[in-house]
Image (cartoon, helix red, strand yellow):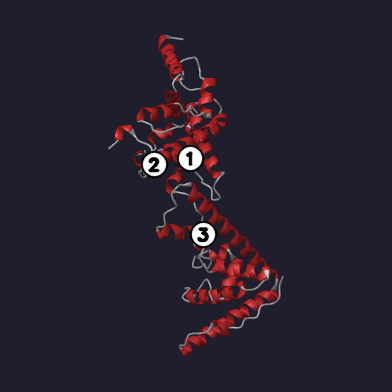
Amino acid sequence: MNDLAAVQAFLSAAMQTDARLSLAQVVAWLDPVYLVNDGDALSSMDDENDVPYALHVCRQCFPAVYGGAVQLLRQGSDEVAVRRYMCDGMNQGLLTKLDDLEQVRYGVPVEGMGLCLEDGEFCDIYPDLAAIVADFGLYAETDYTDYQTARHIASLLVESLSGLSSATLNHLAQLLTWLFALSGNTLVDMTMEDIWESGMEMPDWSPENIAFVNAMTREAQHIIDEATMGEKALHDDPALHTALRKNIQRVRRMLSRTKRSKSNHDRSVIHLDWPERP
Amino acid sequence: MFTAFDVPTLLDCLGRIPPVELQGLELLRQFQPQTGVYFPQLPAEAVCDATIELIDYTQSCQQTVRKLQALPPTPLLVYPVLEFCL
């Protein structure tokens, strides 16, 4: 050992004899980001390098990932390996995954699972759903001017179905909820494009926001799983599909009458027949 | 029976509190290299718990500081504080 290294070893050993210096040494070893842990440091970070920013996020929200990443950096691991380690580690705690560490800057990732009926490719991507939407008078070749009427009809059908104890009919309600963005869950009601165009900002990184987004995603996945079951039920059960079509027409006629008489309709007078289903 | 205290006594009391035992301190004691390198080289998994504990400890200290900064005054009607007597 040369003199310089010997002095360093001596100082290091001497630090061990003082509680405060030992603590400072441990902080520098295990938690170096603490030393620059303030908003100014975060905002002035190089936009090109996501690793320091991601370290801050991990320190706050994924401390185990942070601990591992700091050690990898100390051991001289290459940046690709560190980025992959952090991305994989963070994804363990996220229902909507990060594709790359560069996404960290935009906040907690969300996934819009909504449908855009006006999208020209909707019929190609979802032919079965397009057939159901057509029952509401919305066709690919139309300009969807009747969308609001169709959505209104769907909302009355959902209201009628949701009060029933049948799981199959509840799944059908969830299908209509998904198709016409009626759930109240942003992720079910909006596509990714809607989210980007709305100017909505992703939630900031915090354990509470991660839990919130995960809960919202879990709920959205549950709704869409049930909607998928509703779609299958309609596909496999022609009598149910016929009942849906008839009820759409019933509600449409009722709305037309209400419009003509310019009176407020009383929903209690709408009588919809649904077949008995488990 | 305790009837009064002064600032040096209080400092003495606080000074007698033993240092907190953190896993990181223990790891540093055990694996401190004698080769002139400040920090041990350990696998990531080995230090994760110690890092989590250290961050928790730091946060709880910061929280305590914030609480102390916002501590309302408490009238001491029984114990005389010698430095601030009227």
Residue neighbourhood size for the residue with mark 3, other residues' Cα within 10 Å, grouped as few (<14), some (14–19), many (≥20) = many
Relative vertical location of residue A40 with respect to residue A270 in this rendering, above or below:
above
Q: Amino acid at mark 2?
A: Arg
Instruction: Please state the total of marks drawn on the protein image.
Output: 3
* 2 vs 3, front mark: 2
CB under 8 Å between discs 1 and 3: no
Q: Which residue is pictured at 44% across the width and 11% down the height? A: A6
The three-letter amino acid code for the residue at tag 1 is Cys
Q: Circle 2 marks a residue in which chain? A: B
Occupied quadrant, residue B83: top left
Q: Secondary structure at mark 3?
A: helix
Q: Which residue is mark 1?
A: A58
- Mark 2 Cα within 10 Å, few/some/many (few <14, many 20+)? few
For marks 1 and 3, give the CA distance: 25 Å
Residue under numbered circle 2: B66
Q: Characterize the local packing of mark 1: few (<14), some (14-19) or many (20 or more) Cα atoms within 10 angstroms.
A: many
> Amino acid under label 3?
Leu
- Residue A95, x across and y down, in percent: 56, 50
Q: Position of residue B3 (x, y in %)?
A: 41, 33
- Position of A111 with respect to A238 (left or right) is left
